[in-house]
Amino acid sequence: MRMLRRTMLAVPALLSWPVHAQAPWPSRPVRIVVPYAAGGGTDILARAIGEALRGSLPQPVVVENRAGAAGVIGTEVVVRAEPDGHTLLAVVSTHVMNRYHLASIPYDPIRDVTPIAMLTRNTMVLVAGVTQPFADFRAMIDHARRNPGAVGTGSTEALSSFIGQEVARRANVQMPDIQYRSGGQLMNDIVAGHLPTGWTSTASAMPHIQTGRVRVLAASTATRTPFFPDVPTIAEAGIPEFELAGWVALLGPKGMSDALTARIHGAVAGAFADPALRQRFTALGIEPDLRDGAALRAQMEREDRLWAAAAAAGTIQRQN
C-alpha cells in the first residue's frame, strides 16, 4: 500500500511537469523585425498590427527596422534568433525571390523560417506625379516610346523591379529601373517630380494619392484593387495575361513548435477581427488576406518554383 500511495502521489507531478517546463508566450517584449527602411508599406503594416496586438498581450510589441541588402540583414537577425516567438519577421514576398535575384543569401528562405501567417495581398500600383506629361498607362507607354530611356521606373525590391522591367519588355519600350531603399523614399521623389514613375504598394502610395499629388496609372493584379476601382489592371491597359502580386507575411525562426505558431496566429487573427484595425487598413490602402502557416508555406513553395523557372529562363538577373 505504501508503494502504491507513493506512485499515486507521483502521477500528478509527472503530468504537470511539461506545463511548468514550457515558458508562456509572451514572457517578455515581442520584437517584430521589419527588414526594410521606415515609412514603407511593410513598416506601416507591422506598426499597425503591433499596436493592435498590444491590447491583447501581456507584454509590449516593438517594431524594429533593420534595413539593408534587400531585406537580408534584418531577416538574418530573425533566422538566428531563438525559436521562442519573441523575435518575429514581417517580410514581403521577395523574401522567396531573393535567392534567385541576389548573389547569395546566408539562409534558406523556406527551410530556415517558420511560417506563421500571411497578412495581406500586396497589390503593386504604377504611380506618377501629377506634373508628368501623361495621365494614364497608355499615354505613359506612348511617351516612353517617343523618348527612349527618359521614363525611369522606380522600384524598392526585386518584385517591383521585375514588374517594371517585364512591363517594359512586353510593351517593347526602354524604361530604366531605378532602385530605392524604401517605398517612402520612392514616393518622395515621385511627388517632387524627380522620378517619372514607380511601382510601389497601395499602402505606400495611399497618403500621397489622397492629397492629390500622385496619379495611379495601373495595378499589377489580375483584378482591380478595391482601393482604386477606376484604375485598370496592366492586362486591361493593353498587356494581356499580366498578373504579378506580392504579399506581406509574419515569419519566425526555424524550429518553432506548432502550438506556439498557432498561439501567435490566433493573436494576429484576433487583431484582424477588430473593426478599428480593419478601418485603419482601409485608410492605409492595405488589403487583408489572413492565412495560416500551412497556407503560407504552400504559397512560398509555389512561388519558389515560379522564380526558379524564371531564373532558368533568364528573366531574373542575378546580382554580382
Image (cartoon, rainbow, N blue to C red):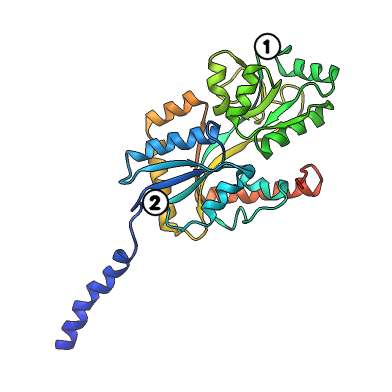
Q: Is residue 256 left or right of residue 181?
A: left
- Looking at the picture, how far across and down is residue 61, in whole percent? 39, 43
Q: Quadrant of residue 2?
A: bottom left
Q: Is residue 37 left or right of residue 98?
A: left
Q: Is residue 86 above or below residue 142?
A: below
| Callout 1–callout 2 Cβ contact below 8 Å | no
Q: CA distance from mark 1 to mark 2?
A: 49 Å
- Looking at the picture, how far across and down is residue 268, in whole percent? 42, 42
Q: Quadrant of residue 57?
A: top left
Residue located at (79% from left, 42% from top): 315
- In this rendered view, identify the residue nearer to me: 267 or 21: 21
Amino acid type at circle 1 is Thr
- Looking at the picture, how far across and down is residue 169, in whole percent? 81, 31
Q: Which residue is mark 2?
A: 263
- In this rendered view, identify the residue nearer to me: 254 or 64: 64
Tell me if mark 1 has few (under 14), some (14-19) or many (20+) residues whose alpha carbon lies within 10 angstroms of its own: some
Amino acid type at circle 2 is Arg
Q: Is residue 51 left or right of residue 97?
A: left
Q: Which residue is mark 1?
A: 131
